[in-house]
Amino acid sequence: MLSLLILGFHQRCTRKPLSDPSKLFPFRLHTLSLLPRRNKPKKHSDVTASTWNTTHRFVLANSTLSILETKCKSMIHLKQVQSQMIVTGLCLDGLAYSRLIAFSALSPMGDLNYSKRLLFAMQNPNAFSWNIIIRAICDSQNPSEAFLLYKEMVAVSVSGVSLRPDNYTFPLLFKTCAKLLFFWMGHEILGHVLKMNYDGDIFVHNALIHFLVSCGELQAAYKVFEESCVRDLVSWNSLINGYTRSGRGKEALRIYREMQMEGDVDPDEVTMIGVVTACTQLEDLKLGREFHWYIRDRGLHMTVPLANALLDMYVKCGDLEEAKVLFERMEEKTMVSWTTMVMGYAKFGYLDTARRLFSAMPEKDVVPWNAMISAYVQAGRGKEALSLFHEMQAMEVEPDEVTMVSCLSACAQLGALDVGIWIHHYIEKHNLLLNVVLGTALVDMYAKCGNIKKALQVFQEIPGRNALTYTAIIGGLALHGDAQDALSYFLEMVDAGLTPDEVTFLGVLSACCHGGLVEEGRKIFSQMSSKFNIPPQIKHYSCMVDLLGRAGLLTEAIELLETMSMEADAVVWGAMFFACRIYKNIELGERAAMKLLDLDPSDSGIYVLLANMYVEANMWDKAGEVRKMMRERGVDKTPGCSSIEVNGNLYEFIVRDKSHPQSNQIYECLIQLSKQMELVESVAGVPHPKDEFLFASEVNN
């Protein structure tokens, strides 16, 4: 370990360590009990509830201390016992006095401040008493105060001799460093460990490894482990689980194989959690199954965390059936177990089953609600997602940033602007952090719901915009026909050093298409592969065919279509057909329409558009053949559907649907609007496309 300090560890210390750790900002917390238990050294990494009780024979044999251990229920009781100990002189006994400190510091009914007063009033304080208070502070809301208490501890002298920390003190301090990610303070504690020759102690050694892996110093942790002369199962488990928590499953499995090759220790349930999680990260179902068989064959205890790890592995590796069997056999199911299965069913498209399981959950926090809402959004069922969000509010479950992102996506799908604005107000009212993910969702929602001005405003307010944020605003501007602005933001994005992806290029090409920017579109399409090494996908070809077709460059469009590296789909041929109809190119239009009918013979829209193209060209016989073809194939015109949001409620309307209670008024309004449109068109000299309405009516009848 000394070589680590000299050769490697000091090289990373480019900043002066802070003398007051309480001034550091506590980042993400990692909790793992490192309190050693000498009677079971191989199990001291198990998470256990803090306890102050003792089974020491001296304590139980003494009537006063026995009352403290078994009858004391409050600080009032403790002070009564303390008074009795002062009267009898029992408080002069170090072990007896330490029991007062233990109750006050560790009992749920205790008082941490009073325990400090007891400690400072102790005539001959020992390391055990100091460790009790340090341990209590480590588990408190202000764990950084443990370092200040440690500083006072090393300054104390008993009978002229300095009080030395022991091998229980340093694991507590390393645990706090890991909890608060105090890397530099951990370095100072390591210096004390080396100075006091505790680097060979197994408990201190394992605590150091845990601290290093918690701070992301995996290489340093492995070096400590490799150079140490003491290691046990906890050492191996700390490394394996440290690598999996960092998303490095391959290295975690390598360390596990090293452990098997040495053969000094056998894996336990904690080891299996690490290796099963590694299989999940690598999506290695075969190896995950082998570990499951190993657990059963060796008779390892199927703890709840281990069962949850296996459940997660099966779901994420694609074996929902095995996950279902495991879930049903679990004797104890936690919220994690239920949430994992809900997400599993949702992932495989069984949304109704997922909803039933979600409803059956005995308790739910924000995580399963988020999982279910997100599942509805990803399935394109935004209305149900928002309905579930309202139900979540009725249950008084506090939404978080993840909830808001999913709900904003649902609003974007539905065009529910009022709900989206309400969510934005909620974010501001509850001071939710407008990070790049939430900000991007807001930009996307406003753009898709028609308020591009607000989308641009939110875009400017987002700190640290990333490629997704630019992609959202570019796509929104394209949707609103602001081609030049979309191109401007695209160039700004590239100049900022951000890399566009396939979706970004789709937005830019769409903007060029709507703006008729042929040259710009050609250039950007060419740069996709030549400059950014992104091969065009079918949607990009569709945009280019549409761009060229709208510009009347039908020959160039059909040449691009025929030279595509993949088979053209209905979207590409549809863009070609639309352009041919605009420019009345019957020959190419027929060819495109026939391709479309080959791809989807049941699409009534293709028949209608083809027949209308013939009608516009006065080719009535051809139009009749199309109508006949529809009747022979049994194709009915798909009724049109539209939706509108009024006062936060979403209403859907289908052609000739009279289910709405105000349908008579709605249809009367439509008739008046139609008359006004005909009047305006006749004044402007625009021909009304009556033939299309007649044909649609004929097909429906």
Image: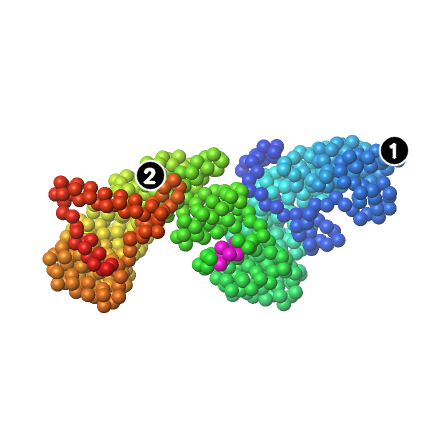
Residue at left offset 38%, top offset 40%: 647
Q: Which quadrant: the C terminus? A: bottom left
Q: Give the residue at the far right of this rendering.
A: 88
Q: Is residue 9 magenta?
A: no
First to last magenta residue range: 353-358
Query: Looking at the magenta stretch, what is its main secondary structure?
Result: helix
Q: Nearer the viewer, residue 122 or 607?
A: 607
- Using the image as rendered, state which of residue 394 and residue 506 is in the foreground: 394
Residue plotted at (55% across, 49% down): 364
Decide if residue 371 is in sight here: yes
Q: Estimate the x, y position of residue 221 in percent, counting from the top left.
A: 59, 49
Q: Is residue 85 above or below residue 391?
A: above
Amino acid type at mark 2: Asn
In the image, is 523 to the left or to the right of 105?
left
Mark 2 residue crowding within 10 angstroms, few (<14) / some (14–19) / many (20+): some
Query: Which corner quadrant of the image does residue 303 belong to?
Result: bottom right
Q: Residue at x 23, y 52 (%)?
A: 546
Residue behind mark 2:
451
> Which residue lies under the disc numbered 1?
87
| Residue 491 seen in render | no
